[in-house]
Amino acid sequence: MAIRKVLLVDDSTTDLVNIKNIVTEAGCIVVTATSGKEAVDKAKVERPDLIFMDIIMPEMDGYAACRLLSNESGTKDIPIVFVTSKNQKADRLWAQMQGGKAFVTKPYAADAIVDQMKAFL
């Protein structure tokens, strides 16, 4: 299965634009959300092939959103890659326990994002 549609979730406009440019350049359709709650709603409707999600966001953080999506029958198979400035071993472990499939630390190189997209082909 090719990665065609990607949901990007970040409350930082700058980070959202940066990652959107990378994903769009890789030839994917991009859907965006600025909170965990919005991400859950959009994932259910849009059914993306992959989700890049920040952790620290208002309304609902990325961990909670990931947990909800991982336990929902319609979205549980969508891989979630956390893209965050949190870089402690505990953060990575907790992300994995919530259902996250990978972890990219900010600031990141474009290659780190593209490599994650290739990993889930």
Image: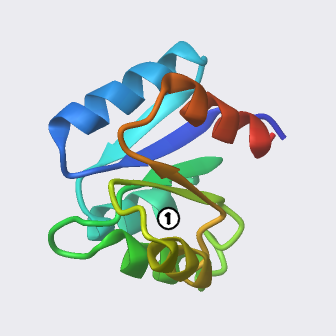
Q: Quadrant of residue 20?
A: top left
Q: Quadrant of residue 86?
A: bottom left
Image quadrant in which the C terminus is located: top right
Relative to 105, is 19 above or below? above
- Find disc 1 in the rendering and name its residue: 44
> Which residue sits furthest front?
88
- Residue 14 in the image: state x and y as whole percent: 19, 32
Relative to 63, is 4 above or below? above
Q: Is 59 situated left or right of 88 in this image? A: left
| Residue plotted at (15% across, 69% down) | 58
- Residue 35 in the image: state x and y as whole percent: 24, 62
Question: Looking at this view, is 41 or 54 the one in front?
Answer: 54
Circle 1 packing at 10 Å, graded few (<14), some (14-19), many (20+), is some
- Label 1 sits on a secondary structure element that is helix
Does residue 26 appear anywhere in the picture? yes
| Residue plotted at (29% across, 62% down) | 38
Q: Quadrant of residue 59?
A: bottom left
Count of labels in the image: 1
Q: Label 1 sits on what residue type?
A: Lys
Does residue 46 appear anywhere in the picture? no
- Residue 19 in the image: state x and y as whole percent: 40, 31
Q: How are the residues colored? A: rainbow
Relative to 32, is 45 above or below? below
- Residue 78 in the image: state x and y as whole percent: 65, 60
Q: Is 109 situated left or right of 34 in this image? A: right
Image quadrant in which the N terminus is located: top right
| Residue plotted at (59% across, 69% down) | 100
